[in-house]
Image (cartoon, helix red, strand yellow):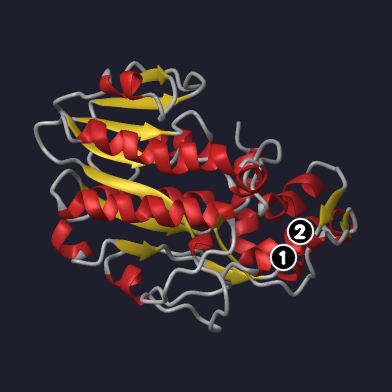
Amino acid sequence: MTVLVTGGAGFLGTRLITALLGGATAHPVPDRVLCVDRIASPLADARVVSCVGSVTDAVFLATLADPDLTTVWHLAAVLSGQSEAEPDLAAEVNVGGTLALLAMCRTLPRPPRFVLASTVAVFGGPLPEVVPEDLALRPATTYGVTKAIAELHVLEATRRGVVDGVAVRVPTVAVRPGAPNSAMSSFVSGIVREPLAGLPSACPVPLDTRLWVASPVTTTANLAAMGAMASEAIGEVRTLNLPGLTVTPADLLAALERAAGAEARARVALTPDAAVDRMVRSWPGAFDVTRAFGIGLVADADADAIVAQFIAERAAP
């Protein structure tokens, strides 16, 4: 069994591949993983084939058309901040890359399961307190627009039998290790990660801003589960809002203080940024995920659990 992960050398991609190969997910352990990214995979495992190239390069993608390919996780994307600054690049990668990958799948002997990592940013405009499954998409950002278009292409390819696809809207993943990325939501991890490292951090949005978040462990488990989920269980509607947790920056900072003390909390300053605030407030803060729970997906318990998970992983050798 061969599987493919785009963005596989990134944070989520590396975690997903590690979990798959370790047998720690609902997906069967693959014999071979094609890690597709612009940089080489950091994983030293003979089962991982590092495929360095762009998802927009049809010639490169043609070399990945393994007849044994059963599952594709498409995580590669231009994120929210960079998408707003470079809309042409966002369209090229987020839309064009998805189309190119689907075209490669058309050459396979069997339609693979195709899991598109979409985003809660496909929603925008006037939003209810809790977003239902069937709310119309009205993205208010370039990132959200390109991801909504990519979703439609996956749905069309599924209708035509090219892939067995599902587009999953991923919550903001927190707490991420490492350096900040180009996502407008990067501060959500930063207000926990940096203070724990003894560094100052800034919160650019009001402390009562609602955020829909999930930990790396939970996000990885749910992405892997969607790669293995029976088509009948997913049903005819091939878009899904992944479970998350509604928290505010105030909730995360309170959890940080409970875990690491007032000194850590004091390292975070409220530094308003109108552009970030406008974008983040256009995203939903809560979803009805009854359907996701009904097919066995999971959510984090609370903000304390999210902070504790990061601290535990940070302390691990």
Q: Which of 71 and 297 is in front in this view?
A: 71
174 on left or right of 42? right
Relative to 276, is 72 above or below?
Answer: above
Relative to 192, is 44 above or below?
Answer: above
Residue 277 x, y percent position in the rendering: 74, 64
Which quadrant is home to the N terminus? Answer: top left
Q: Which of 231 and 85 is in front in this view?
A: 85
Evaluate if marks 1 and 2 touch, with contact meaning CB atoms under 8 Å apart: yes
Q: Is mark 2 on a helix, strand or loop?
A: helix
Residue at coordinates 19% horizontally, 66% vertically from top-left?
Answer: 235
Reading the image, the residue beneath label 2 is 275
Identified by mark 2, the residue type is: Ala
65 on left or right of 188? left
Q: Quadrant of residue 75?
A: top left
Disc assigned to residue 278: 1
Q: Is mark 1 on a helix, strand or loop?
A: helix
Residue at coordinates 37% horizontally, 40% vertically from top-left?
Answer: 98
Disc assigned to residue 237: none
Q: Which of 219 and 272 is in front in this view?
A: 272
Residue at coordinates 78% horizontally, 45% vertically from top-left?
Answer: 194
Which quadrant is home to the C terminus? Answer: top right
Residue 39 x, y percent position in the rendering: 52, 21
Q: Does the image show residue 297? A: no
